[in-house]
Amino acid sequence: MYRALIFDFDYTLGDTTLSICESINYALTRMGYAPHSTEEIRKTIGYSLNITFRMLTGDCGEEKERLFFEHFVVKADEIMTQDARLYEGAEELLRAWSERYRLAIVSTKHRVRITDILAKFRLDGVVPVVVGNEDVGQEKPHPEGLLLAAEKLQVPKKDALYIGDSVVDAEAAARAKIDFSAVLTGTTPREAFEPFPHVAICENLAQLSQFLKNVSENSL
């Protein structure tokens, strides 16, 4: 039976697509690149901003990636928290799960971005551990963030479950040797998760909740 649940944020617990797209296009146009469609940008959500820049522009370079990051943050600071929304039922499930599990979020966002969103929904005390991009030397799919979250939660890896919506999350869990459950609330299809170790592939958080209930009952 699991003692801790570790979540990705974007497309797992909630959605900040509109503000991400606006912030990315703000950064791109400031640098002289053409803006991209929402659908193009959605496919990059979950990756680090450096990788997002490379995917959208086909360009690379430390200085360009630094500028892209800085421009993105300027716009994101203005709009992201106010535009953030949680998926239907997520708030209630997190509150219920916090009575049984230790909860954490591991995200490629700034930690303060996640903590501000949690505070907006009065969940800051419900999810006490947040690991953001400034807390790690290497972002997902490197396992550092997941291992740090497990350490902060004070649970062994075998007692933690990581929940995410992308193959980046699946790979991070595999490399961390932490159990993984996919949720199909993002842009990644079911078949993309099949090659990765997983204990469940759930349509949404409600189905995940049922999976956790079954695990709990079967462990009695």
Image: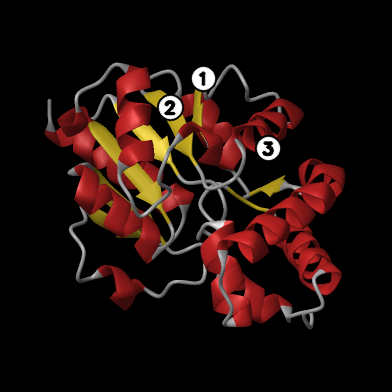
On the image, numbered disc 2 is attached to which residue?
A: 103
Residue 56, position in %: x, y? 62, 78
The reply to whether the C-beta atoms of the residues labelled 2 and 1 are less than 8 Å apart is yes
| Separation (CA) of disc 2 from disc 1 | 7 Å
| Separation (CA) of disc 1 from disc 3 | 14 Å
Q: How many numbered markers are drawn?
A: 3
On the image, numbered disc 3 is attached to which residue?
A: 113
The amino acid on which the numbered mark 1 sits, given as a three-letter code, is Pro
Residue 55, position in %: x, y? 55, 76
- Position above or below: 194 against 137: below
SS of the residue at dot 3? helix
Quadrant, the C terminus: top left
Residue 140, position in %: x, y? 40, 51
On the image, numbered disc 1 is attached to which residue?
A: 128
Give the mark, 1 or 3, whose residue is nearer the N terminus. 3
Give the mark, 2 or 3, whose residue is nearer the N terminus. 2
The amino acid on which the numbered mark 2 sits, given as a three-letter code, is Leu
User: Given this view, does label 2 or label 3 mark the residue nearer the observer?
Assistant: 3
- Position above or below: 77 against 181: above
Quadrant in the picture for residue 34: bottom right
Residue 10, position in %: x, y? 57, 53
| Separation (CA) of disc 2 from disc 3 | 17 Å
User: Given this view, does label 1 or label 3 mark the residue nearer the observer?
Assistant: 3
